[in-house]
Amino acid sequence: KAGVTQTPRYLIKTRGQQVTLSCSPISGHRSVSWYQQTPGQGLQFLFEYFSETQRNKGNFPGRFSGRQFSNSRSEMNVSTLELGDSALYLCASSWDPGQTSTDTQYFGPGTRLTVL
Amino acid sequence: AQSVTQPDIHITVSEGASLELRCNYSYGATPYLFWYVQSPGQGLQLLLKYFSGDTLVQGIKGFEAEFKRSQSSFNLRKPSVHWSDAAEYFCAVHPPTISNFGNEKLTFGTGTRLTIIP
């Protein structure tokens, strides 16, 4: 079974631009979560999508948004990029049985975003 | 709010030596516990996890971890490290949600970077 895939792997943007990152979960997984990883702040949770709905959100400004499609693929968008948005953005998927929630998150390789 | 502490930022061990990476958590109930490893420029790979039951958990690549409720710890161990184990290791917790709208996210520690010397 193929793992979580993320595209693109590397991205360079300038301040003020917007960017869209894509994540394809493991086949059959219904939940997709996004994390930001920076040297200063470590790994921080952005948001989680399940059945095309945002189910949980971390403490990030509204410039960070996302969506999930009916096939569970997810995209995240960052508008009006700032230098501090330079980071590795990781996507994770899980099966999510729902009520018991004993699932495990499996991570993709990440998208390295550099903002100049 | 839940939190995870990895007190060692950087550890250096000799190849063939034993390894223990420390992880302590703070949470109202026993959370689900995970160890992930990240090689440079890569995503996170799951090493092992603890949900319930036997407190000694076996993972991939010869790693194991022991859950100690009294100490709120979930330390990672390996009896003999290999040069390929050099990486960054993250401990993470996940609330034991029983809800369709649970707070289902991972909280990570700050990581421990492992260096192996020949």
Image: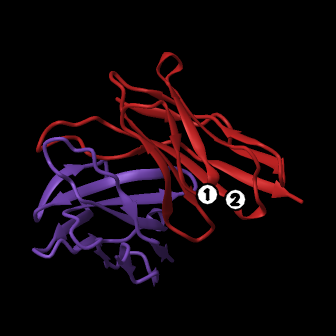
Chain colours: A purple, B red
Q: How many circles with numbers are drawn on the protein?
A: 2
Secondary structure under badge 1?
helix
Q: Residue at x 71, y 59 (%)?
A: B86
Q: Amino acid at mark 2?
A: Asp
User: For mark 1, what is the residue?
Assistant: B61
Q: Amino acid at mark 1?
A: Lys
Left or right of B78 on screen, residue B17: right
User: For mark 2, what is the residue?
Assistant: B85
Left or right of A24 on screen, residue A88: right
Q: Residue at x 49, y 61 (%)?
A: B44
Q: Quadrant of residue A92?
A: bottom left
Q: Residue at x 31, y 52 (%)?
A: A60
Please state which of residues B96 and A79 is positioned toward the viewer in this rendering.
B96
Q: Residue furthest front?
A: B54
Q: Quadrant of residue B15?
A: bottom right
State the image coordinates of residue B80 (x, y, percent, origin top left). Answer: 76, 49
State the image coordinates of residue B38 (x, y, percent, origin top left). Answer: 57, 61
Q: Nearer the viewer, mark 1 or mark 2?
A: 1
Residues under numbered marks 1 and 2 in contact, where contact means CB atoms less than 8 Å apart:
yes
Among the two numbered marks 1 and 2 on one chain, the one whose residue lies closer to the N terminus: 1
Q: CA distance from mark 1 to mark 2?
A: 9 Å
